[in-house]
Amino acid sequence: MSSRAKTLLLVLVDMALPIGLYYVLRAMDVSYHSALLISSLLPGLSVVASLVRRRRPDGLGLFMTAMMVGSAAVSLLVHDPRFLLAKDGWITAISGLWFLASVRGRQPLAFAFTRFVLEGRIGPLKGGDGSGRESWDVLWERLPAFRRIWRVATVIWGIGLLADAAVRVTMAYTLPPDVVPGLGGLQYGVFMVLMQVVMACYLVPTGLYNRWSPLYLPLKETPA
């Protein structure tokens, strides 16, 4: 299994297992707070394992680690079940703000996340000789339009995450407690599908997925 597939599997496990564990604990008559606390600490195990393995997290790893550590800290320090149910919403809101703040950084978060999955699969061929796709470092350095695409994409993701957070917090404070974890897990899937559609509507017309797109012409016109 490739490293990318392993990472995607860990993300799935980090979302599915806590929800399943919560309902198992509730079936055993564990209190709302205790069930939420125990299940919310579970995702941190994969983060700890990743840190031990890598020792030096990159920007993407730092973002994921900070979100998991923040989530675990809230779970341990807060004793209000409703607030714990809304925790994912608050963490998602922080993620959205982090995305927006990264727009002016060296490389925005949408670029970092997408690069992890798609680098080597999209973009022009190296020197046109068919020896592989051009590095995204080269594209980022030499194509202002490429940089602008990912800054706009990061803004879209930031706004989407803030909207998702608002829905999560509203559900946490208005719906029956035992309904919220399941709906929250379902919302992850719905949100990801919607965001993929929105991003496709933006990215496809930019020519990002077309290696002959005018987006990449400066690579041929200007020597490296």
Image (spheres, grey):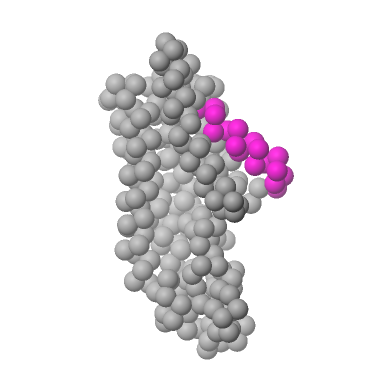
The mark total stands at: 0
Determine whether 31 is above or below 215 in the image.
above
What residue appears at the point 51 percent right and 36 percent down from the top-left corner?
14
In-image side of 83 versus 173 (left or right): right
What residue appears at the point 34 percent right and 50 percent down from the top-left corner?
193
Which span of residues is magenta-colored? 40-56
Residue 135 spot, x, y in % from top left: 59, 71
In-image side of 214 versus 42 (left or right): left
Camera-side residue: 184 or 98? 184
Q: Is residue 51 magenta?
A: yes
Kindly report the secondary structure that dominates the magenta region of the rendered protein: helix
Q: Which quadrant: the C terminus?
A: bottom right
Camera-side residue: 49 or 163? 49
Residue 131 spot, x, y in % from top left: 60, 78
Inspect this view and state whether residue 74 appears.
no
Dividing the picture into quadrants, the one containing residue 23 is top left
